[in-house]
Amino acid sequence: MANDYLKEHILLRHKDNPNIGDIDEYLSDGGYEGLKKALEEMQPAEVIEAVKASGLRGRGGAGFPTGVKWSFIPKGAKDVYIVVNADESEPGTFKDRELMEYNPHLVIEGAAIAAYAVGARTIYIYGRGEFKGPFVTLQKAVDQAYERGMLGKNIMGSDYSLDLHLHLGAGAYICGEETALLNSLEGYRGYPRSRPPFPAVEGLYAKPTVINNVETMANVPGIIRHGVEWYRQFGTEKSAGTKVFSLSGHVNRPGNYELPLGVPIRYLIEELGGGVPNGKRVKAVLPAGESSLMVPEDKLDTPMDYESMGAIGSMLGSASFIVMDETVDIVWAAEKMIHFFKHESCGKCSPCREGTYWLSNVYHRIRSGEGTMEDIELLPKIIEQMSGNTFCPLGEFATSPVKASLLHFRHEYEQYIKK
Ligand SMILES: Cc1cc2nc3c(=O)[nH]c(=O)nc-3n(C[C@H](O)[C@H](O)[C@H](O)COP(=O)(O)O)c2cc1C
Ligand code: SF4
């Protein structure tokens, strides 16, 4: 039993079978059966239909339906690419790394099925610059897959050929944004591109491209191997499947936990994470790293799925839950988050470049004891000018710590001024 909600792990299968990173063990566990089934029994369009029907939504943050995304690739297009987003730069998110290091064939198999579905001949896995270690492990798995004929010419005895390359960026948060990632992969500066055209029409090297997160790809083999009904037994109607939740911060047992979507936050923190150290209370939780609006303690019974998290004014995003206990100074935490966004802003557009700079200055004033009540009023004015005016969502993400901390913990700002 993986936990109260899941008999055995699906994505984090290595927790039940530690040697699954090796291709022989992966094969004896039913690995590559999904790819075999797709190649031998299904037309590419049928694979897309199955992924659509499964209800799988992208695990990179936005939760966009994966099968629908695949169906945007123009029919009969030549030189289609698959790009796997392994940038994983959101603070507190470390699920993709674990998947690539411990269950790499699941990711490779998922990407290979995706490639077959959209008619791609080349897959790139783009990792953040700091992923040198995980990419060594992943490369070994890729080499094994080539040796066994799961990649290369005429894979698994079919007439379909497929190559997979790994590429490391230089380590920038913005390169997780899909169009900045494409620029970086092409060797340019990691600036986001304007859309349209969307990557499905003009992506890598201006060719139709599907970009999916590592965990999204890891969901695909199970859907094809076991079928849509099997997949839909996990999760909720609109948020199907299981999800890896990265848990960190003030918890006794931080780590990655796999659960069906829709389990309450409280279960993750208290049962799996062993609660807050020293019997302290939770003050707030960041459910999707720093890009999400923090959730106060009274919302811990909210189910962790896309709709429910949205309904409380936050989001599920990459599901990286950072717990802050009652001792955390929220103004300090918000300042740290703004510092992060200021540092990671690519500088292309002024609302984000200047906005994060001014926010950072105001926080510095307040925290150093030189702030005034007017400064508290200034913060929402700055984020109002940023919201809806930035070139990419990073600028929008940067407003989250300010918005949520003022909404739930305004009194902590006022205390700073009064002190
Ligand atoms: C600033 C920014 C950073 C992002 N970082 C990541 C990331 O590290 N990994 C990721 O998979 N998606 C990231 N995304 C989302 C991607 O742009 C894209 O939506 C995702 O890779 C699509 O895959 P999915 O449909 O499988 O979720 C980021 C988006 C933004 C705006
Ligand atoms: S919002 Fe920020 S990260 Fe995005 S393009 Fe503008 S400056 Fe760059």
Image (spheres, rainbow, N blue to C red):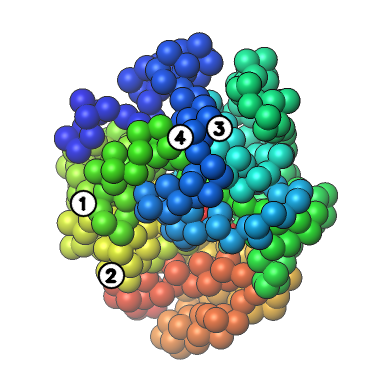
**What residue did someone put label 1 on?**
264
**Front residue of this view, candidates 278 and 34:** 34
Point out the tag, 2 or 3, that comes first from the N-terminus: 3
**Gap in angstroms between the C-alphas marked 4 and 1:** 27 Å
Q: Secondary structure at mark 3?
A: helix
**Gap in angstroms between the C-alphas marked 1 and 2:** 14 Å
Label disc, if present, on residue 311 of the rendered structure: 2
Judge depth for marks 4 and 1 and give the one in front: 4
Q: Quadrant of residue 234?
A: top left
Label 3: few (<14), some or many (≥20) within 10 Å?
A: many
Q: Are marks 2 and 4 in contact (CB under 8 Å)?
A: no
Point out the tag, 4 or 1, that comes first from the N-terminus: 4
**What residue did someone put label 3 on?**
39
Q: Secondary structure at mark 4?
A: helix
Label disc, if present, on residue 330 of the rendered structure: none
Q: Are marks 1 and 2 in contact (CB under 8 Å)?
A: no
Q: Please state which amino acid type lies under the numbered disc 3.
A: Leu
Against 50, residue 163 (above or below) is: above
**What residue did someone put label 4 on?**
221
